[in-house]
Amino acid sequence: MDIICVGEMVIDFLPGEEEGVYIRKAGGAPANVAIAAARNGLEAGFCGCVGDDDFGRFLIDTLRSNKVSILCPDMVREAVTTMAFVTLNRDGERSFTFARKPGADMFLTRAHIDKADVARAKVLHAGSCSLSKDPAAAATVYAMEQAKKAGRLVSFDVNYRNLLWDDDRQAAIRAVQDILPLVDLLKVSEEECDFLGGEEKIADTAEMNGISLVVETLGSKGARCYWNGKEISVPGMKAVCVDTTGAGDAFWGGFLACLLRSGVEKVSQLTDDIINDALRYGNIAGWLCVQKKGAIESLPSSEEIERIKSEME
Protein backbone atom coordinates (compact mmCIF):
# COMPACT_ATOMS: atom_id res chain seq x y z
CA MET A 1 0.00 0.00 0.00
CA ASP A 2 1.24 3.49 -0.81
CA ILE A 3 -0.53 5.55 1.83
CA ILE A 4 -2.71 5.05 4.91
CA CYS A 5 -4.72 7.97 6.26
CA VAL A 6 -5.76 7.91 9.92
CA GLY A 7 -8.54 10.02 11.38
CA GLU A 8 -12.28 10.14 11.86
CA MET A 9 -13.53 13.70 11.99
CA VAL A 10 -16.10 14.39 9.33
CA ILE A 11 -16.36 18.18 9.35
CA ASP A 12 -16.39 19.40 5.80
CA PHE A 13 -18.33 22.41 4.61
CA LEU A 14 -18.83 24.21 1.34
CA PRO A 15 -19.76 27.86 0.91
CA GLY A 16 -22.78 28.65 -1.22
CA GLU A 17 -22.99 31.29 -3.93
CA GLU A 18 -24.40 34.05 -1.74
CA GLU A 19 -23.46 35.68 1.55
CA GLY A 20 -24.37 33.58 4.54
CA VAL A 21 -25.27 30.50 2.49
CA TYR A 22 -23.60 27.16 3.08
CA ILE A 23 -24.01 23.63 1.75
CA ARG A 24 -23.19 20.62 3.90
CA LYS A 25 -20.81 18.03 2.46
CA ALA A 26 -19.38 14.90 4.00
CA GLY A 27 -15.61 14.60 4.05
CA GLY A 28 -12.84 15.21 6.54
CA ALA A 29 -9.19 15.85 5.84
CA PRO A 30 -7.75 12.31 6.26
CA ALA A 31 -10.55 10.77 4.18
CA ASN A 32 -10.18 13.48 1.54
CA VAL A 33 -6.43 12.90 1.29
CA ALA A 34 -7.01 9.14 0.91
CA ILE A 35 -9.47 9.75 -1.91
CA ALA A 36 -7.26 12.39 -3.55
CA ALA A 37 -4.30 9.97 -3.41
CA ALA A 38 -6.40 7.15 -4.90
CA ARG A 39 -7.58 9.39 -7.74
CA ASN A 40 -3.90 10.04 -8.41
CA GLY A 41 -3.15 6.36 -8.85
CA LEU A 42 -1.94 5.46 -5.34
CA GLU A 43 -3.02 2.41 -3.37
CA ALA A 44 -4.74 4.17 -0.47
CA GLY A 45 -6.27 3.02 2.81
CA PHE A 46 -8.36 4.82 5.42
CA CYS A 47 -8.68 3.99 9.11
CA GLY A 48 -11.30 5.87 11.09
CA CYS A 49 -14.79 5.72 12.61
CA VAL A 50 -17.73 7.84 11.46
CA GLY A 51 -21.32 8.24 12.55
CA ASP A 52 -24.08 5.96 11.28
CA ASP A 53 -25.98 8.73 9.53
CA ASP A 54 -26.40 10.02 5.98
CA PHE A 55 -23.05 11.81 5.99
CA GLY A 56 -21.13 8.90 7.47
CA ARG A 57 -22.64 6.41 5.02
CA PHE A 58 -21.96 8.79 2.14
CA LEU A 59 -18.32 8.96 3.18
CA ILE A 60 -17.97 5.17 3.30
CA ASP A 61 -19.65 4.77 -0.10
CA THR A 62 -17.37 7.44 -1.56
CA LEU A 63 -14.25 5.76 -0.15
CA ARG A 64 -15.29 2.41 -1.60
CA SER A 65 -16.25 3.81 -4.99
CA ASN A 66 -12.79 5.38 -5.23
CA LYS A 67 -11.15 2.04 -4.39
CA VAL A 68 -9.84 3.23 -1.03
CA SER A 69 -9.35 0.26 1.32
CA ILE A 70 -11.30 0.62 4.57
CA LEU A 71 -9.02 -0.60 7.34
CA CYS A 72 -11.16 0.06 10.40
CA PRO A 73 -13.31 -3.07 11.03
CA ASP A 74 -16.18 -1.28 12.77
CA MET A 75 -16.00 2.01 10.95
CA VAL A 76 -19.64 3.01 11.41
CA ARG A 77 -20.83 3.59 14.97
CA GLU A 78 -24.23 4.50 16.33
CA ALA A 79 -23.52 8.20 16.51
CA VAL A 80 -24.19 11.38 14.63
CA THR A 81 -21.31 12.58 12.52
CA THR A 82 -19.87 15.86 13.76
CA MET A 83 -20.41 18.51 11.12
CA ALA A 84 -19.15 22.05 10.71
CA PHE A 85 -20.89 24.75 8.70
CA VAL A 86 -19.26 27.90 7.46
CA THR A 87 -20.71 31.30 6.80
CA LEU A 88 -18.86 33.67 4.48
CA ASN A 89 -19.30 37.41 4.44
CA ARG A 90 -18.60 39.60 1.40
CA ASP A 91 -14.95 39.98 2.43
CA GLY A 92 -14.45 36.22 2.43
CA GLU A 93 -14.18 36.03 6.23
CA ARG A 94 -15.37 32.75 7.70
CA SER A 95 -17.29 31.87 10.84
CA PHE A 96 -17.90 28.28 11.97
CA THR A 97 -20.93 26.63 13.52
CA PHE A 98 -20.73 23.01 14.70
CA ALA A 99 -23.73 20.73 14.54
CA ARG A 100 -23.00 19.19 17.92
CA LYS A 101 -20.33 19.21 20.62
CA PRO A 102 -16.96 19.27 18.84
CA GLY A 103 -15.12 15.99 18.96
CA ALA A 104 -18.04 14.13 20.56
CA ASP A 105 -18.01 11.23 18.12
CA MET A 106 -14.39 10.04 18.21
CA PHE A 107 -14.33 6.27 18.52
CA LEU A 108 -11.02 5.32 16.92
CA THR A 109 -8.89 3.22 19.28
CA ARG A 110 -5.45 1.63 19.23
CA ALA A 111 -7.17 -1.70 18.55
CA HIS A 112 -8.17 -0.35 15.13
CA ILE A 113 -4.55 0.25 14.11
CA ASP A 114 -2.99 -2.77 12.41
CA LYS A 115 0.79 -2.54 12.80
CA ALA A 116 1.26 -4.76 9.73
CA ASP A 117 -0.80 -2.35 7.58
CA VAL A 118 1.22 0.60 8.86
CA ALA A 119 4.51 -1.18 8.22
CA ARG A 120 3.54 -1.95 4.61
CA ALA A 121 2.51 1.59 3.70
CA LYS A 122 5.08 3.98 2.27
CA VAL A 123 3.39 7.01 3.91
CA LEU A 124 1.20 7.34 6.96
CA HIS A 125 -0.89 10.52 6.96
CA ALA A 126 -2.80 12.00 9.91
CA GLY A 127 -4.49 15.27 10.80
CA SER A 128 -4.59 17.29 14.00
CA CYS A 129 -8.38 17.17 14.38
CA SER A 130 -8.01 13.54 15.46
CA LEU A 131 -5.84 14.67 18.38
CA SER A 132 -8.64 16.59 20.06
CA LYS A 133 -10.25 13.74 22.02
CA ASP A 134 -9.21 10.39 23.47
CA PRO A 135 -9.18 7.56 22.53
CA ALA A 136 -8.72 8.82 18.96
CA ALA A 137 -5.76 10.98 20.00
CA ALA A 138 -3.95 7.98 21.51
CA ALA A 139 -4.75 5.88 18.44
CA THR A 140 -3.46 8.55 16.05
CA VAL A 141 -0.21 8.98 17.98
CA TYR A 142 0.20 5.19 18.16
CA ALA A 143 -0.18 4.89 14.36
CA MET A 144 2.42 7.60 13.82
CA GLU A 145 4.81 5.93 16.27
CA GLN A 146 4.45 2.57 14.49
CA ALA A 147 5.11 4.18 11.11
CA LYS A 148 8.18 5.95 12.46
CA LYS A 149 9.54 2.69 13.92
CA ALA A 150 9.01 0.98 10.56
CA GLY A 151 11.01 3.70 8.81
CA ARG A 152 8.03 5.01 6.85
CA LEU A 153 7.34 8.61 5.94
CA VAL A 154 4.97 10.30 8.38
CA SER A 155 2.81 13.07 6.96
CA PHE A 156 0.79 15.43 9.15
CA ASP A 157 -1.78 18.11 8.31
CA VAL A 158 -2.30 20.91 10.83
CA ASN A 159 -6.05 21.53 10.92
CA TYR A 160 -5.81 23.49 14.15
CA ARG A 161 -9.54 24.27 14.62
CA ASN A 162 -9.14 25.11 18.29
CA LEU A 163 -12.94 24.77 18.54
CA LEU A 164 -12.32 21.02 18.50
CA TRP A 165 -10.49 21.44 21.80
CA ASP A 166 -13.55 23.15 23.29
CA ASP A 167 -12.18 26.60 22.39
CA ASP A 168 -8.91 25.94 24.24
CA ARG A 169 -6.36 27.45 21.85
CA GLN A 170 -3.35 26.46 23.98
CA ALA A 171 -4.54 22.85 24.21
CA ALA A 172 -4.78 22.73 20.42
CA ILE A 173 -1.26 24.10 20.02
CA ARG A 174 0.18 21.73 22.64
CA ALA A 175 -1.45 18.69 21.01
CA VAL A 176 0.14 19.54 17.67
CA GLN A 177 3.54 20.37 19.16
CA ASP A 178 3.64 17.10 21.11
CA ILE A 179 3.57 14.96 17.96
CA LEU A 180 5.99 17.03 15.84
CA PRO A 181 9.01 14.81 16.63
CA LEU A 182 7.19 12.01 14.79
CA VAL A 183 6.59 14.06 11.64
CA ASP A 184 8.63 14.04 8.41
CA LEU A 185 6.30 16.03 6.15
CA LEU A 186 4.26 18.83 7.72
CA LYS A 187 1.47 20.69 5.92
CA VAL A 188 0.19 24.02 7.21
CA SER A 189 -1.87 26.79 5.70
CA GLU A 190 -0.99 30.47 6.00
CA GLU A 191 -3.71 30.91 8.62
CA GLU A 192 -2.59 27.86 10.60
CA CYS A 193 1.02 28.99 10.41
CA ASP A 194 0.00 32.27 12.05
CA PHE A 195 -1.99 30.35 14.67
CA LEU A 196 1.12 28.37 15.63
CA GLY A 197 3.26 31.47 16.02
CA GLY A 198 4.24 32.56 12.52
CA GLU A 199 6.72 31.38 9.91
CA GLU A 200 9.87 31.91 12.00
CA LYS A 201 8.39 29.90 14.85
CA ILE A 202 7.37 27.14 12.43
CA ALA A 203 10.88 27.04 10.94
CA ASP A 204 12.48 26.91 14.40
CA THR A 205 10.03 24.23 15.52
CA ALA A 206 10.74 22.16 12.41
CA GLU A 207 14.48 22.36 12.91
CA MET A 208 14.19 21.56 16.61
CA ASN A 209 11.98 18.53 15.98
CA GLY A 210 13.81 17.20 12.94
CA ILE A 211 10.91 17.76 10.54
CA SER A 212 12.26 17.36 7.03
CA LEU A 213 9.72 19.27 5.00
CA VAL A 214 7.28 22.05 5.90
CA VAL A 215 4.85 22.96 3.13
CA GLU A 216 2.71 26.05 3.46
CA THR A 217 -0.31 26.17 1.17
CA LEU A 218 -1.31 29.71 0.29
CA GLY A 219 -4.35 29.12 -1.93
CA SER A 220 -4.46 31.46 -4.90
CA LYS A 221 -1.09 32.91 -3.81
CA GLY A 222 0.63 29.58 -4.38
CA ALA A 223 2.57 27.29 -2.07
CA ARG A 224 6.01 27.27 -0.55
CA CYS A 225 8.22 24.73 1.11
CA TYR A 226 10.88 25.09 3.79
CA TRP A 227 13.56 22.44 3.44
CA ASN A 228 17.24 22.20 4.34
CA GLY A 229 17.33 25.85 5.38
CA LYS A 230 15.93 27.15 2.10
CA GLU A 231 12.60 28.06 0.57
CA ILE A 232 11.10 26.63 -2.62
CA SER A 233 7.94 28.34 -3.87
CA VAL A 234 5.51 28.10 -6.76
CA PRO A 235 3.09 30.83 -7.89
CA GLY A 236 -0.62 30.58 -7.36
CA MET A 237 -3.34 30.11 -9.94
CA LYS A 238 -6.26 32.50 -10.19
CA ALA A 239 -9.17 31.15 -8.15
CA VAL A 240 -12.87 31.66 -8.85
CA CYS A 241 -14.07 30.86 -5.32
CA VAL A 242 -13.03 32.59 -2.11
CA ASP A 243 -12.80 29.45 -0.03
CA THR A 244 -13.24 25.81 -0.96
CA THR A 245 -13.30 22.75 1.22
CA GLY A 246 -11.04 19.98 -0.02
CA ALA A 247 -8.62 22.21 -1.95
CA GLY A 248 -5.85 21.75 0.60
CA ASP A 249 -6.48 17.99 0.70
CA ALA A 250 -6.46 17.84 -3.10
CA PHE A 251 -3.14 19.70 -3.00
CA TRP A 252 -1.65 17.29 -0.47
CA GLY A 253 -2.93 14.14 -2.17
CA GLY A 254 -1.39 15.34 -5.44
CA PHE A 255 1.81 16.43 -3.71
CA LEU A 256 2.32 13.05 -2.01
CA ALA A 257 1.43 11.17 -5.20
CA CYS A 258 4.05 13.13 -7.11
CA LEU A 259 6.67 12.37 -4.45
CA LEU A 260 5.94 8.64 -4.47
CA ARG A 261 5.85 8.43 -8.26
CA SER A 262 9.30 10.02 -8.22
CA GLY A 263 10.49 7.07 -6.13
CA VAL A 264 10.71 8.94 -2.83
CA GLU A 265 10.18 6.63 0.14
CA LYS A 266 12.75 8.17 2.46
CA VAL A 267 13.62 11.76 3.33
CA SER A 268 17.14 11.25 2.00
CA GLN A 269 15.71 10.80 -1.51
CA LEU A 270 14.19 14.29 -1.64
CA THR A 271 15.72 16.83 -4.02
CA ASP A 272 14.92 20.43 -4.92
CA ASP A 273 13.61 19.35 -8.34
CA ILE A 274 11.34 16.64 -6.92
CA ILE A 275 9.91 19.04 -4.32
CA ASN A 276 9.36 21.75 -6.92
CA ASP A 277 7.52 19.31 -9.23
CA ALA A 278 5.38 18.08 -6.33
CA LEU A 279 4.47 21.64 -5.31
CA ARG A 280 3.40 22.49 -8.86
CA TYR A 281 1.44 19.25 -9.23
CA GLY A 282 -0.32 19.79 -5.91
CA ASN A 283 -1.04 23.41 -6.77
CA ILE A 284 -2.86 22.36 -9.95
CA ALA A 285 -4.81 19.74 -7.98
CA GLY A 286 -5.96 22.35 -5.45
CA TRP A 287 -6.86 24.81 -8.19
CA LEU A 288 -8.97 22.19 -9.99
CA CYS A 289 -10.83 21.47 -6.76
CA VAL A 290 -11.58 25.19 -6.40
CA GLN A 291 -12.92 25.40 -9.95
CA LYS A 292 -15.44 22.69 -9.14
CA LYS A 293 -16.42 24.35 -5.84
CA GLY A 294 -14.82 21.79 -3.55
CA ALA A 295 -15.64 18.79 -1.33
CA ILE A 296 -15.13 15.12 -2.10
CA GLU A 297 -16.75 15.12 -5.53
CA SER A 298 -14.28 17.77 -6.71
CA LEU A 299 -11.02 16.04 -5.77
CA PRO A 300 -9.25 15.79 -9.16
CA SER A 301 -7.76 12.75 -10.88
CA SER A 302 -4.21 12.46 -12.18
CA GLU A 303 -5.59 12.69 -15.75
CA GLU A 304 -7.18 16.06 -15.01
CA ILE A 305 -4.02 17.37 -13.37
CA GLU A 306 -1.77 16.15 -16.20
CA ARG A 307 -4.04 17.83 -18.76
CA ILE A 308 -3.73 21.22 -17.06
CA LYS A 309 0.00 20.67 -16.50
CA SER A 310 0.59 19.99 -20.20
CA GLU A 311 -1.46 23.06 -21.18
CA MET A 312 0.67 25.22 -18.89
CA GLU A 313 3.90 23.85 -20.35
Image: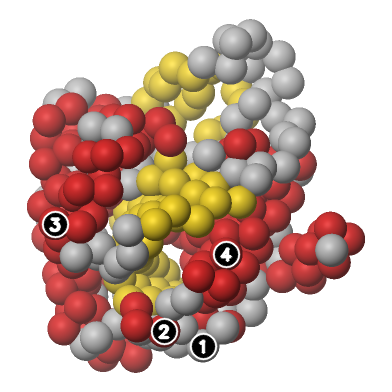
| Mark toward the viewer: 1 or 4 | 4
Q: Of all residues shown, which one is farthest toward the right?
A: 311
Q: Earlier in the sequence, mark 4 or mark 2?
A: 2
Compared with 136, 218 (above or below) is: above
Q: How far apart are marks 4 and 3 (CA)?
A: 24 Å
The Cα–Cα distance between marks 2 and 1, rounded to whole angstroms, is 8 Å
Pick whichever of labels 1 and 4 is earlier in the sequence.
1
Left or right placement of residue 115 versus residue 265 in this view: left
- Of mark 2 and mark 3, the one earlier in the sequence is 3
Residue in the picture at 40% in, 21% down: 97
> Which image quadrant: the N terminus?
bottom left
Q: Can residue 112 be seen in this view?
A: yes
Location of mark 1 (residue): 263
**Disc 4 residue type (three-letter):** Asn
> What kind of element bears circle 4?
helix
Residue indicated by mark 4: 276
Query: Which callout, 3 or 1, points at the residue further toward the start of the chain?
Result: 3
Q: Visible in this render: residue 72?
A: no
Q: What residue type is labelled 1?
A: Gly
Instruction: Describe residue 136's horizontal placement relative to residue 262 as left or right.
Output: left
Q: Position of residue 194 (x, y in %)?
A: 32, 30
Label pair 2/1, CB-CB below 8 angstroms = yes
* Residue assigned mark 2: 269
Could you give the CA–CA distance between mark 4 and mark 2, rounded to whole angstroms? 14 Å
| Residue at the image point whose x is 57% and y is 55% from the top | 251
- Which residue has dot 3 on it? 208
Residue depicted at 18% across the width and 37% down the height: 172
Toward which corner of the image does residue 71 lie, by quadrant?
Answer: bottom left
* Amino acid found under the numbered disc labelled 3: Met
Q: Position of residue 180 (x, y in %)?
A: 18, 57
